[in-house]
Image: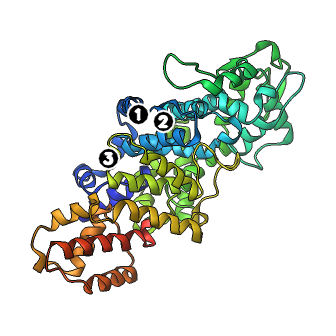
Amino acid sequence: MKKEIELVAHLYRRAGFGESRENIDMIAKDNYEGVVEKLLNPGERDSLSDDLIRRYHVDQSEMRLLNSATGNWIYRMVTTTNPLEEKITLFWHGLFATGFSKVFHGKTISAQIDMLRGVGLGNFRDILLGISKDPAMLFWLDNNDNHANAINENYGRELLELFSMSIGNYTEKDVKECSRAFTGWTVQNIDYMGLRALSASIWPYSNIAWQYEYKKEDHDNTIKEFLGEKGDFNGEDVIDIIVKNPATATFISTRLYQFFVSDTIGEDGKSLIDLMVKSYFDSGFELKSVLRCLFNSDHFKSSKIRYAKVKSPIELIVGILKLAEEFKFPNMNIIDASRSVGYMGQQIYNPPSVEGWHEGVEWLDSGNLLERINFASRYLSGNDKVCVQDVINKIGGKYSEITPNYLLEECLNQLGYINLDKVTEQNLVNNVSLKEFKNAEEITNAVSDTIRSVVSSREFQLA
């Protein structure tokens, strides 16, 4: 049973944000393939968190400021019953990077996030069509300035380079023809709505600014030649051509692999990507089928790729807050979490550029690492914290029977069944051996100190 539990813990670190010991124990009672299916098909979307936010925290609800907007999403990630839905939304947010620095309205970006949440596990054609009609994206990449008589290539170029195919699989002529196909795709009454956005919120009776509009009179209706095909193409036609291109299948499969499996791609990784490409075409571009192929693969389940990815700041913080159990109801501390994500280098809703964030070991420079460890210690290792008290309750009152190895194992399990390398594990055991367990106070201090040591470990920073 231990192997099954550790495999489920690994799956939820990658397909979600980690889970508590109690939840992992319960989930692992099902067979692994069944667990994957429940992640891919979670049922109805949970709307309770939105209602709670509106009742308890008006600023998070209205999302006029960056931290309140990001706090809203962090709360959803922490409390969701559909973790893969939020995780794939985070993936698309990094791929279709759209920033508050230019759009300057939390509601507009939040609407994009919600759109991606709805289609994120669906068909890649629908995903590309959704982002191409999204007002925040249209403004972010200047397609509102893309006119039949004055082509702006910004969106057309990034659609091919960063969103679907990557450099080397299209020509400069394809960029121009793609851009011509998207003329007329714009934001309704952009100047006026930009002013209205300053006072808009997400409440049903408020101003819902930034709507997509297709201006037929501003569309270039001439014949276009794109990726070897000719016609009077519109944006939808271009997307149809893009999604059936082999380069697109390889691109999206590779990006999914790097997000869910490993930053580096070895021979086993290349073989899995080939299978994912096949699933992409066999299913008619369905992302759910591609992810099913990924999660059920022997390569993904292999112990070799566990702890092979550095947790991004948002992955780390959401995982910590889930373990801390402090956000069953909205409270102002979520703003602290939002700020901390930014301090660690990943301000969601505001990526540094259209390329998104540079990930991997870059998350672990000395300043970021100190912030990561301090945040984890603050929420998990105090004597009154949930993780500490749960370990105490698990141990019971048999203080004289506690060994250093047993205490460390209980702490590792409490934090989501973490496995340490042998050297780190022995160092922590030696540290615990220096403590005495004569009474409740001593054992509580020992548990708190051990959890603090674990969250400072290399493995806790990895997924």
Callouts 3 and 1 close, C-beta under 8 Å:
no
Q: Position of residue 293 (x, y in %)?
A: 45, 48
Crowd band around label 1 with a 10 angstrom C-alpha radius: few (<14), some (14–19), many (20+): many
Question: Which is more N-terminal, label 1 or label 3?
Answer: 3
Look at label 1 and name its amino acid.
Ile
Foreground residue among 268 and 15: 15
- Relative side of 337 to 250, left or right: left
Which quarter of the rendering shows the C terminus? bottom left
Foreground residue among 71 and 322: 71
Tell me the CA gap for discs 1 and 2: 7 Å
Look at label 3 and name its amino acid.
Val
Which disc, if any, is residue 60?
2
Look at label 2 and name its amino acid.
Gln
Which disc, if any, is residue 53?
1
Q: Is residue 241 visible?
A: no
Q: Tell me what residue is drawn at x 49 percent, y 34 percent.
A: 59
Q: Position of residue 195 (x, y in %)?
A: 70, 23
Q: Tell me what residue is drawn at x 11 percent, y 80 percent.
A: 400
Number of numbered discs visible in the structure rendering: 3
Q: Does 188 appear above or below 156?
A: above
**Considering the numbered disc 2 on the image, is that residue within a helix, a strand or a loop?**
helix
Callouts 1 and 2 close, C-beta under 8 Å:
yes
Label 3, on which residue?
Answer: 35
Residue 160 image-quadrant placement: top right
